[in-house]
Structures are given as structure tokens and as C-alpha cells.
Image (cartoon, rainbow, N blue to C red):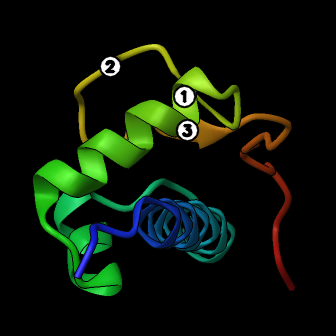
Amino acid sequence: MPYNTKNRCEQGQALRKEIYMYIVSYIKLVGYAPSITEISERVDAGRATVWKHINNLVDDGLLKTNHPSTDRAYTPVGYGIRKINKEIK
């Protein structure tokens, strides 16, 4: 059976999208990015695979970081996190 490059590419793109969407939803819920281990467990992929996809997302301009190769240092481009100094009643 020949190697199906198209299928592998589509699987990689689907995994990259799943990683990106998980990072976005995690930040919205918790206020900071998930660790590589948390992402790895969520998407059922190895840590090296997750790092590869995160680096590709940075290269594609979808994620940004000031501290490459650091856990929880990635933020989706266009998303901002602000602390609100407002008392909740």
C-alpha cells in the first residue's frame, strides 16, 4: 500500500487546529496558556509533536511568544489578557 501523503497532511492540519482551539479555549477559561503536557494529554499526541505544531503555529502567525520553548508562553495573535481591577459584588 503506497504512503498517503495527502492523508498525513490532512491529519497534521486537523491536529494543529485542535491544538490551537484548545489553547484558545483554555486561555478563555483559566486566563493563561496550558502546558505542553496538558495539550499533549488533551489531543493524545506526544510532547515533541505538540512542540512541532506550536512552532508551526508561531511560524504561521497564529500564535506569538516572547519566550520560545517555554511552557505557557504562547498566546493566540489577536487575543489579549487583561487584569480587571473591579470588585465583584
Seen at 13% across and 49% down, the residue is 48
The amino acid beneath tag 3 is Leu
Q: Give left or right: position of 25 versus 34.
A: right
Neighbor class of circle 3 (other Cα within 10 Å; few <14, some 14-19, many 20+) is some
Q: Nearer the viewer, residue 76 or 51?
A: 51
List x then y, in percent, for residue 76: 68, 43
Q: Quadrant of residue 63?
A: top right
Seen at 56% across and 72% down, the residue is 14
Residue at the disc numbered 2? 68
Q: Give left or right: position of 12 versus 13.
A: left
Look at the numbered disc 2 and give the secondary structure of its residue.
Answer: loop
Mark 3 in CB contact with mark 1 (< 8 angstroms): yes
The amino acid beneath tag 2 is Pro
Which is nearer the N-term, disc 1 or disc 2? 1
Seen at 30% across and 41% down, the residue is 52
Query: The N terminus lies in which quarter of the figure?
Result: bottom left
Look at the numbered disc 3 and give the secondary structure of its residue.
Answer: helix
Residue at the disc numbered 1? 58
1 vs 36: above or below: below
List x then y, in percent, for residue 56: 47, 34
List x then y, in percent, for residue 47: 13, 58
Look at the numbered disc 1 and give the secondary structure of its residue.
Answer: helix
Residue at the disc numbered 3? 57
Mark 1 in CB contact with mark 2 (< 8 angstroms): yes
Which is nearer the N-term, disc 3 or disc 2? 3
Neighbor class of circle 2 (other Cα within 10 Å; few <14, some 14-19, many 20+) is few
